[in-house]
Amino acid sequence: MKKIFVFGLLLLGATAVKAQEKVEVTVEADVVNQYIWRGQKLGNTGFQPTLGVGWKGLSLTAWGNTGLTDSGDTREFDLTLGYTIAGFNIGVCDYWFSAGLDPEGRYFKYDAHGTNHIFEANIGYDFGPVAFQWYTNFTGNDYKLNGDRGYSSYFEISAPFKLATCDWTATAGAVPFGAQAVYGTEDFAVTNLSLRCTKDIKITDSFSIPIFGEVIGNPCSQHAYLVFGLTLRP
């Protein structure tokens, strides 16, 4: 479940307004040495394609993960519908996994206690120096041990900055309530402390490849990860 990405264009002036009149398409893919999501390891070396379309702040994005080195890695396919205006964003994401309540991994099975889908709503605001995001599961495969619906939630604060020739983002994320089925904790817990660096590697005058590295710590699980990846774009 990749950190939810809601794509849209910011309305920062007349130029931005005009830009939103055009349909924007995103086609790209990341290759990563391991798949870490909100401080949890969900897979090993993976291929993560993205296909998105956006218009006037409204966006629909498809994202997936397929393991490249471990046949036991769970496949994932996410669909996100989002809307962004100025710094405000809101969205809904449908996460699907090849493993879950349905042993056959059927995509079009939505039974309350037999689906591999998780549905999540998110809301956030980008203040510029810092951004805040809140996520809550509202249906799907998210249950407490007693069988009640989990409503697992997560929030994070991120701060982008530039240092040397790189773009950096520092992130702190936590789960706010007890019995968080998805995040593996029964109490409030900080699950994600990360520092990410991105840099474009110039190949030719008209073509470059973004690469990124990220240090991630999960104080709740007592695990830490070093992630490296690159982004492929046409």
Image (cartoon, grey):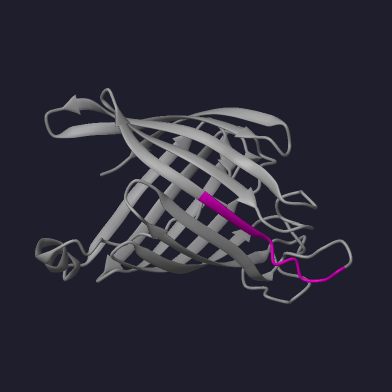
Q: Residue furthest top?
A: 164
Task: Point out residue 3 in the picture as x, y percentages from the top left corner.
Answer: 51, 50
Q: Is residue 3 above or below residue 146?
A: above
Magenta-drawn segment: 147-156
* Magenta span contains residue 155: yes
Tally of numbered tags:
0
Q: Nearer the viewer, residue 100 or 107?
A: 100
What is the x, y in percent for residue 25? Answer: 27, 59
Measuring 70% from the left and 41% from the top, which residue is drawn there?
72
Instruction: Report the predominant secondary structure element of the magenta stretch.
Output: loop
**Image coords of residue 12 (percent x, y):** 19, 61
Quarter holding the C terminus is top left
Q: Residue visible at 29% across and 43% down?
A: 233
Q: Residue furthest right?
A: 146
Q: Residue at x 57, y 54 (%)?
A: 155
Left or right: 148 as drawn, with respect to 194: right
Going by the image, does 124 lie left or right of 85? right
- Please, which residue is most extreme toward the bottom here? 111
**Residue 190 image-quadrant placement:** top right
Q: Position of residue 27 (x, y in %)?
A: 32, 52
160 to the left or right of 172: left
